[in-house]
Image (cartoon, helix red, strand yellow):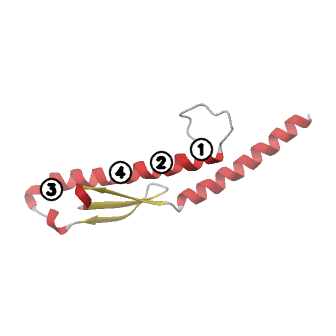
Amino acid sequence: MKDLLGLMGKAKEMQAKFRAMQDEIATVEAAGQSGGGLVSVTLTGKFEMKSLKIDPSLFKEDDVEVLEDLLLAAHNDARVKVEQIMQEKTKALTAGLPIPPGMKLPF
């Protein structure tokens, strides 16, 4: 019984740490670039686009597809950076816990 209460206490403690980590991740920002910096996108930790910058040299009627590709690439670059930050913070929080590889937290 004592072990069960201790386990429940640790679970509540871990849950509080996860909430704090989620709040911290929500404040994270990551910038992604493409085209050698011609397009830049900034995402928040919630994957919301906060800013978008496009070099004026890309505004040509016949280059619309290039611009679209660069926007997607910059967004994906920023998304990967946010995911890496989330993984690092989760790894630090769960150090020592027997969690299977690839399992995404919080649940």
Which residue appears at 60% of the width and 31% of the height?
100
Q: Is residue 57 left or right of residue 36?
A: left
Q: Which residue is mark 3?
A: 64
Name the amino acid, label 2.
Gln
Q: CA distance from mark 3 to mark 1?
A: 41 Å
Q: Sequence order check: which comes first, mark 3 or mark 1? A: 3
User: Is label 2 in a helix, a strand or a loop?
Assistant: helix
Q: Sequence order check: which comes first, mark 1 or mark 4? A: 4
Quadrant where the C terminus sits is top right
Q: Residue furthest left?
A: 62
Q: Which residue is mark 4?
A: 77
Rendering coords of residue 64 (x, y %): 15, 56
Name the amino acid, label 3.
Val
Quadrant where the N terminus sits is top right
Q: Sequence order check: which comes first, mark 4 or mark 3? A: 3
Q: Sequence order check: which comes first, mark 2 or mark 4? A: 4
Q: Which residue is mark 1?
A: 91
Nearer the camera: disc 4 or disc 3? 4
Residue 73 drawn above or below residue 50 = above
User: Is label 1 in a helix, a strand or a loop?
Assistant: helix
Rendering coords of residue 13 (x, y %): 76, 49
Q: CA distance from mark 1 to mark 2?
A: 10 Å
Q: Which residue is mark 2?
A: 84
Q: Residue furthest top?
A: 100
Residue 35 drawn above or below residue 6 = below
Q: Is residue 39 left or right of residue 8?
A: left
Name the amino acid, label 1.
Lys
Nearer the camera: disc 2 or disc 3? 2
